[in-house]
Amino acid sequence: MTFLHAFPASAALALSLSLGSAAAQAAEPASQPPAAWLASWTASPQAVWASDFLFPSNVPAVVHDQTIRQVARLSVGGRRVRIVLSNAYGTLPLRIGAASVALSAQDSTLQPGSLRSLTFSGQPSATVAPGAPLVSDPVDLAVPDLARLTVSIYLPQATPASTFHWDGRETAWLAPGERTRAARIDTQQAGVRTTTARLLLSAIQVEATEGTQAVAILGDSITDGASASLGRDTRWPDVLAERLAPHGVAVINAGISGARLLSDGMGEKALARFGRDVLEQPGVRTAIVLIGINDISWPGTAFARQEKRPTLAALKSGYGQLIAQARSRGVRVIGATLTPFAGALPGTPLDDYYQEEKDALRQRLNAWIRDSGSFDAVLDFDAWARDPAHPLRLLPAYDSGDHLHPGDAGNRALAEAVDLTLLFGNQSPRPAYKAVLK
């Protein structure tokens, strides 16, 4: 029995694929194949919120004469890498004094011999304009699939923290002074602090073989990994990346905890950020959309006491706009049903997050996602995650304990249930980087 289904026009194409087939590998040149830039990892930018918000930001108000060291696991590897910094929500120019990238060893330690200093338009320092990204020059650093990279950024001037990604699921280090070339940052050193938020770093791109593609996942905390184990790459997009990397397909996570489709939440509404976080990322050919539960459940809670819940028609219209944006770029759109959440967030200020009428709307929206024919394919996360004995609840083995977010086991189950052939239509993925660069 399967809960995944595509619609007839795309099903025949999808089912004809043979991922990583011997014939496709034989057709690719064995040395120096054409290359293209590919998004291999992302963290969607958010505006740093005020101190009176329900959750702490976990970043300092101002960074001054400090190095920020962050670790990120790539999906697909490549011959060279470059990074993207974001000042999307800054109102002032942001000065980068120095930056580096290296293969990660353990914690803040770098692998010997892998450190590369970054430049920007040939210069070791740069200024990021307000509201803008900054792309580094490429560096020669061959990275394998699923490599963990360490990026260090030095901010010499007093810099208000304005752009971040709140739920990084990784430890980052802030150390005094210019430490971008340090082999390790000692957490016992005076002035060193850690955070699980990300500052400035929004993407890592690799120079991969031409035709390599990416799957982008637009979502909220369930995709962002709110209850995944810290530093262990156990979010469901991480597990999907492990499955797809051998086929030369990257997975990028465009989830933001607290995100909504129609309204701003703990990040800009999905309708506003879809272009930046998904469609403009190099190599994206497929988008998975798993968002909407916060639209349904935030109104009336401590997050949004005075807001009215959106109608089913409004949610369908919002999804329709995402689909139209994607198809105008030739990107396939995969819809994912919203997972069960009865009893969500007990004993917290958000213990009214679940209500029966909210769940009724979720189920109507899920029925439309499954049956409307609007998407190129559907991933029935609701069916996979629910407890058969209590279908409004998560299966206990998959529940992180808050009855809303899957834990590590639930994330793995969701990712492993995805039929990979549904993700590509007639765009068969190219062989993996490691298979052709020998």
Image (spheres, rainbow, N blue to C red):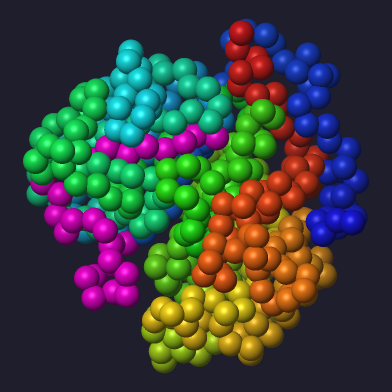
Q: Position of residue 153 (x, y in %)?
A: 24, 36
On screen, residue 162 versus residue 190, left or right, reads right
Q: Is residue 119 visible?
A: no
Depth order, front residue of 389/240? 389
Identify the residue shown where x is 74% and y is 75%: 391
On screen, residue 189 versus residue 287, left or right, reads left
Q: Position of residue 55 (x, y in %)?
A: 32, 70
Q: Which residues are magenta?
A: 47-75
Identify the residue shown where x is 57% and y is 79%: 343
Q: Position of residue 84 (x, y in %)?
A: 37, 39
Q: Most prominent secondary structure in the magenta stretch?
A: loop
Q: How many marks?
A: 0
Identify the residue shown where x is 72% and y is 15%: 28
The picture quadrant where one finds residue 404 is: bottom right
Depth order, front residue of 106/161? 106
Q: Please tell me whether residue 351 belongs to the stretch shown in magenta.
A: no
The quarter of the image holding the C terminus is top right
Identify the residue shown where x is 21% and y is 32%: 185
Q: Is residue 393 above or below residue 118?
A: below
Q: Position of residue 422 (x, y in %)?
A: 78, 47
Q: Is residue 257 visible?
A: yes
Q: Is residue 8 above or below residue 367?
A: above
On screen, residue 344 versus residue 96, left or right, reads right
